[in-house]
Amino acid sequence: MSRALFLVVGLVAGCTFAPSGAGGDGDGDGDGDGDGDGDGDGGGDGASLGDAADGGVTDCRLGFVDLCSLGPPAPPMTVSGAETIDTDTDPRCTTLAQAGGPDGCLVWVESLSIATGARLTGVGSRPLVLAARNSVRLDGVVDVASRRGQPRGAGASSLPCAAQTVPEDDIGGAGGGAGGTFGTSGGNGGTGDTDVSLGADGNAAPGLVTTVIVAPGFARGGCRGQDGGDEGAGGGRGGVGGDSGGAVIIASFGDVQIGVTGQVLASGAGASGGQVQAGGGGAGSGGYIGLEGDLVQIDGTLAANGGGGGGGGARVGGSPVTGGPGGDGSVGAAIAAGGTPAYDAAGGTGAASTGAATVGASSIVGGGGGGGGLGVIAVRGPYTITGSTSPMPVSP
Ligand SMILES: [Ca+2]
Ligand SMILES: [Ca+2]
């Protein structure tokens, strides 16, 4: 487990925001008094953002979301059961343009609370952006993770990732697919047909991963794993690659509190195993979690882990055997299991803060698929951690 207790106290460079009456937030930079800009903004924006109760926004920062540019928020949002937001169709979405990134679905509310045992699931092609004028309190789950065989998380696998070397088809045993690479590298696929059987085409090259993507300052899904190589026309099909984890931002003018039972999940999906003689699929990488507030308090769990690669397929004693699927990216900091082999080519394990993604095994039959790499967790503003985050946060 990746547990740490520390406090990061730092002021965001450039313009900062603080609602009046938040008490003490302005001490560090003197916003609380004598800031001419603050006074001006407070008056100008008062119609949309200020009110008698909180005294209006006195200063603004351009973080993940320019909250000061928004109109009045929707009423407080409380999730107490299971609820899903499809970021392509939900009427609560307004389109958020992200500089350099994909459009997101912005849900802009007065405050946000997710109760213990409740779950807010984001699906659809766009990242999910939850923003509150006042506090955010998560005791339940915000879920944009992807899981094998289920709809992918919001914004998952929706942006292109650098081209990977495609695994080779081979009747004597195909190559395994590479795992998705995002915040850290996925694992390569395994080589197939290392005994060069059934023809003169040599062994089967594996799928190879690409370079890591520098942590972006906007929400985007991670990278999908590759499909495994096929046995050949009409033969066994390569394992289906895993979707990446999705993307979510949670931003507030006030504090963002993730309680002990709270979770934000953006892990990638495990891949399917290869059919007879075919390569296992590569797993999806973790996705993106962005958090922003006056203080971000992480007492619960943040996870953007990679999934496990699929096992390689084989013909064993004349019978076709399909490799096992890899595990989905974990909740917490455990590595995801690779798929069991039909013969001897297991899938690679998925990345978590406790271990890097591993490669699929090479074999005389179909190679294993690689595990998925880590996603990205980015926090703007000061934060504390007493819970578990995998990977550890970066400051964009
Ligand atoms: Ca072979
Ligand atoms: Ca061959």
Image: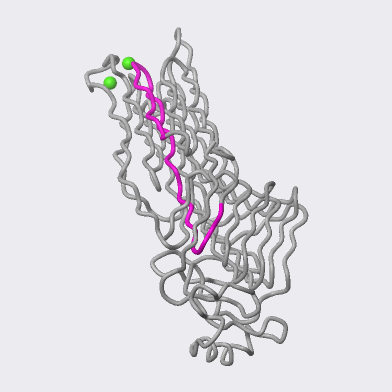
Residue 319: x and y, percent? 48, 12
> Split into 4 quadrants, where in the image is the C terminus?
bottom left
Q: Tell me the residue at 40%/21% (across/down).
A: 277
Above or below residue 165? Residue 135 is below
Q: Quadrant of ligand 1?
A: top left
Q: Nearer the viewer, residue 235 or 278?
A: 278
What stretch of residues is rendered in magenta? 356-384
**Left or right: where does residue 163 sit relative to residue 86?**
left
Q: Tell me the residue at 35%/51% (across/down).
A: 213
What is the magenta segment's predominant secondary structure? loop
Above or below residue 217? Residue 54 is below
Image quarter for residue 15?
Answer: bottom left
**Left or right: where does residue 245 sit relative to residue 80?**
left
Q: Nearer the viewer, residue 395 or 193?
A: 395
Residue 386: x and y, percent? 59, 47
Above or below residue 30? Residue 291 is above
Whether 377 is among the magenta residues is yes
Q: Residue furthest top?
A: 317
Residue 227: x and y, percent? 41, 37
Q: Nearer the viewer, residue 223 or 356?
A: 356
Q: Tell me the residue at 36%/41% (across/down).
A: 185
Whether 316 is among the magenta residues is no
What color scheme is it? one colour
Residue 18: x and y, percent? 57, 76
> Split into 4 quadrants, where in the image is the N terminus?
top right
